[in-house]
Image (spheres, rainbow, N blue to C red):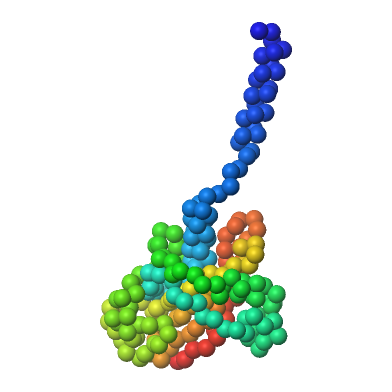
Amino acid sequence: MRKSVVTKTLFIAAIGSIALSAYRAPLSDVEVALQNKNQDHEVIGAAITLIAPGQAALRGIVMPDSTIAPLVDEQLNDRNSALMKTHFPNHVQIVPLTYKDFIKTKKKMKIERTLLNAPKVKIDFESGSSLAAMGILPDTPTDSSWRIFKAKYPDATNFVAVSLPGYDSGRDMALVSYFNLCGPSCYQKGYVLLERNVDTRLWRAIHRNIVFGGG
């Protein structure tokens, strides 16, 4: 075989190899679900880092091992609402976008410690049944809940539960709701708005809004 033919053959083979490597097959449903699950964990981890106040970041918090139902406030759909103007003045255009996905019916996600990126926060996980036995219910907190909670976790400073995130169409903004039990008659419910850095692809919380609370 002549040298020119060999060269041509190798060139065609190289082009074919590059074309094959450049071709990306569409992701399977399993792969998409895994990507979404990992992203949910990244968002929740970033939200927890913001929610956990100074001492909680040092002494630890307790979380349920699964997400809770999202806090739904219809004002998030109204750009002219008091909630939007007061608490999200710089993000009025973003929040309704994330809210649309946020209110979709979603299954609870079991939170996996290895995927939850919140390295500065010491976290203990409890099952829903164990929390219910302690009287710690995010929808109906009681004074006795804190006493039972502290008896089991004397070093923990907060009990924090979060929802699954809602995303904008580009999945670069996320909205998470949370419940935070912080002492006798001390609790808050609110939202954390997050964004993903275009270059690093890492999530960071940019705003926290306490809708209501006590204590």
| Residue 201 percent location from the top left of the image | 60, 57
Query: To which quarter of the image does residue 98 belong?
Result: bottom right
The residue lying toward the viewer, choosing from 215 and 92, is: 92
Identified at 65% across, 72% down, the residue is 97
In the figure, is residue 123 to the left or right of 89?
A: left
Left or right: 19 in relation to 215:
right
In this view, 29 is above or below 187: above
Placement of the N terminus among the 4 image quadrants: top right
Q: Quadrant of residue 171?
A: bottom right
Left or right of 39, for residue 168: right
Q: Determine whether, in the image, residue 92 is placed left or right of residue 121.
A: right
- Residue at the image point whose x is 32% and y is 84% from the top: 135
- Locate residue 208, reporting x and y percent: 57, 78
- Where is residue 118 shown, x and y percent of the image? 46, 65
Task: Confirm whether residue 145 shows in the render.
Answer: yes
Residue 188's spot in the image, x, y percent?
48, 85
Which of 76/103 is in front?
Answer: 103
Quarter where residue 136 is shown: bottom left
